[in-house]
Amino acid sequence: MAVLQMQRVSICALKKDRKSILEKLQSMGVMEVSQVLEDESGFEKQDTQGTRILFEKKASSADQALEILQEYAPEKTSFLSSLEGKALIEKEKYAESISKKEDIMDVVSDLVGWQKEIAECRANIQKTENQIEALSPWLSLDVPMNFEGTGSVKALIGSFSSVMTLEEIYTLTAEHAPDVEGVDVTILSSDRDSTYVVVLCLREQAELVENALRQGGFARPSQLCDEIPKVEQENLTAEIGLLEKQIEVCQNHIKECADKRAQLRVISDYFRTRAQKYEVLGTIPQSEKTFLISGYVPKKAANAVKKAMEENYDLVVEIEEIKEEEEAPVVLSNNGFSESVEGVLESYGLPKKGEVDPTFIMSFFYVFFFGLMLSDAAYGLVIFLACFIAIKKFPRMERGMYKSLKMFMYCGLSTLVWGVLFGGYFGDAIDVVARTFFHVDVPSTGLIKAVWFVPLNDPMRLLMYSMLFGVIHLFMGLGIKGYMLAKEKQYMDFFCDVIIWYVFLIGLILMLLPSSIFASISQIPAGTFPPAVSVTGKVMAIAGAVGLLLMSGRANKNVALRLALGAYDIYNVTGWLSDVLSYSRLLALGLATGVIASVVNQMGSMLGDGILGAIGFIVVFIIGHTLNLAINLLGAYVHTNRLQFVEFFGKFYEGGGKPFNPFKLTTKYVDVKEETYL
C-alpha cells in the first residue's frame, strides 16, 4: 500500500559526453525526462526529428523483413507462444549483432526487394490469366485477332452483347444494309451474355456492314494480338510458367535468410531504441559546450543514478525533493500478493497527489469476492493449476500478463476454498455420477458435505453474509477516506465526513438488527437481540443525523442553506443502501455457477448408464462445464471489478495520477540483460 516517493534529478554535463550519458540513462531505465529549463538565454534545443524518423524507418523496415520471413519461412511456435515474452540476451551478444548492422540492413533490403518482385510477378500472372480468359471465346478462330482480311474481302472480328443466332445476324444486315450482298457470318462461340463472330464481306461494303452490325450491339475486341488465339494462349501460359519459376526463386532466397531472424530482431530493437534516444535528445537544452537533462527518479534509485554518472563523467548531479505544487508520476510498490491486482487499479486510474495506494487492501477484498462469486472447488483448482503452470513455464512473459495470471491464480485458490465451504465440485457432479453410473443412494446432503452450508439450499443465508461483507467493504473505504483526511491534518473534515457517518450508519444497523425484516432474512428468531441494541441504535442514528444536518454544510455561513445541505447529505443514506444492495451480486453469481453446473450434470446423465451413457456424459460434461467456467469466470471478473470501482473507490478514491514513463530501452523483440535499479 505504497507509492514510491519521487525525486527530481538534474544533470549538467559536457556536450561531448552527451551520447554516452543518454545511453547510460536509457540502459538504467529509471528516469522520466521532464525538463524544467525552458528556452533560457544561451541554451537551445536540437532538431532531431529527421534523424529520429530515419531510425524509425529502419526499425520499420526490419519489422517488415521479419514479417516477410514469417510469411515464406514461418517460425514454428506453440499455442502458448504469446506467453513466452521477449528473449533475454547478453550485452556482449547484443553488441556483436549491432556491429554487423550494415550487413543485416543489406539482408533487409534484399528481403524487401524479393518480396516486391514476388508481388510484381503475381500481379503479372493475374494480368496474364485475365488475357487468357479474354481469349477463351476466340480459340476456334484460325487467324490472328488483328486479321483485316484479303485484298478484296474485309474480315470483321467482334462480338454482340447478347445471344444471337445466324438468322438474327443476317436479318440485321438485311434490314440496315439492304444493298449489301455476299455477307458471310461465322459464330465462333457464345455464352449467356455475348456472341462471338467473324463476318466476311466485300471491302468496299465493309463500312455499311459494320454500321448495320452495330445496330445489334456489335463491337470489336479490346484485346488484339498478332498470333492465332490458340497460339497466343500457349505463349501466355508459358509466360505464366516463367513468372512462377521467378517467384519460386525469390521464395527460396527468402527462405535461405531464415537463420538471420534473430539478428533482424536485435537490429529492429536497436534502431527503435536509437529513435527513442533522439526523441529525448530533442527535448534537452544545450549550449555550445554543455547540456542539461532533468527528470523524475524514484527516491530509492536516485543515488544509484548519481553514483553511475559521477563515476564515469565530469558533470554535476543535483537531487531535490518534488515541489509542493508539482505533480510527480506514480510508481506503485506492493508485496508479491497485492501487486497482482495493480493492473485492476491502473485500469481505473493511478492515485493522484495526496491519495493513498489502495492496492494492498483492495487485493484481499478482490480475491475474496472473486472466489465467492465463482465458488466451485473444481473450477478453482482448474484456474489455479492453469495459471500456476503458465507462470512457471513462461518466466519471461510480459509483466502485465504475469500480474494478471498471478491474480487469477490467487482468485483460483479463493474459489477453491469457497467451493469446499459450499460443497461445490463441478456442481453436484460427484453425486450425479455416483447415482447414475454406480447406483449409489446419495443422501440429501450429498456424498461430500459442505464444510459450511450449500447456497442452493439456503440462499437467504448467503444473501445476509453478502450484505455483511458489503458493509465491511464499504466501511473500509470510508475508513481509508478518514485516514487520508487525518494524514492531511484535516481533523474537522475527518470528524464530520467520517466519524459522524460511522455513528449514523452503525446506529441504523443496530436499529435494523432486532427488526422482523432482519429476522426474516437472517432466519434469526425475533427477540434474540436485547432491547438495549435498538435503543443504542436509535441514539446513535439520531446523534449522527443531527451531526450531519448541522455539519455537512459547514462551509456556508447561511444557516438555511447549511441546514438544507445537511438534510440532503442525510438523504444520501439511500446511496449507501443502494451500494449495500449491490453486493447481492455475490449471491446471484455464486448461485448461477452452481445452478448451471447442476443443469449440465443432469443433461449429461439423461442417457443413463452403460457405455453410450458414459460417452454422452463425458461429452456434455466437458463442453458444458467449459462454457460454464468461461461465462462465470468473465462474470466474476467484471462484477468484482465493479464492486471495487463503484462501491469501494466511490467512498474515497478519485485516481487520475500520471503513470511513470521512464526513458528506457523499450524493445519489441529482445531484452538486453542489464542491472536493475527498481
Image (cartoon, rainbow, N blue to C red):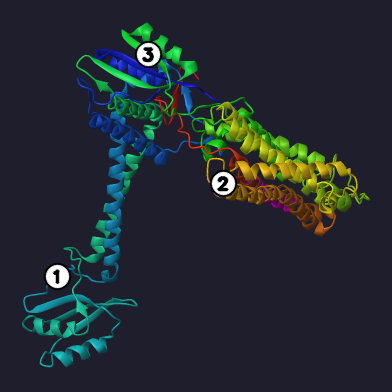
Q: Residue at image x 67%, y 38%?
A: 500
Q: Which residues are magenta?
A: 618-634
Q: CA distance from mark 2 to mark 3?
A: 53 Å
Q: Is residue 476 visible?
A: yes
Q: Residue at image x 41%, y 16%?
A: 320
Q: Is residue 376 visible?
A: no
Number of numbered discs overlaid on the protein picture: 3
Mark 3 residue type: Glu
Based on the picture, tell me whether residue 623 belongs to the magenta stretch.
yes
- Mark with earlier residue (2, 3): 3
Q: Which residue is mark 2?
A: 559
The picture places residue 589, in percent across and down from the top left corner, at 71, 50
Q: In the image, 568: left or right of 670?
A: right
Do the CB atoms of the residues marked 1 and 3 lie less than 8 Å apart? no
Q: In the image, 556: left or right of 419?
A: left
- Mark with earlier residue (1, 3): 1
Between 500 and 313, the one lying in front of the other is 500
Q: CA distance from mark 1 to mark 3?
A: 90 Å
Instruction: Bin the neighbour count of mark 3 within 10 Å (Cα to Cα): few under 14, some 14-19, many 20 and up.
Output: few
Instruction: Please identify, in this view, whether the residue under mark 2 or under mark 1 is nearer the observer.
Output: 2
Name the element at disc 3: strand
Name the element at disc 2: helix
Mark 2 residue type: Val
Q: In the image, 365: left or right of 41?
A: right
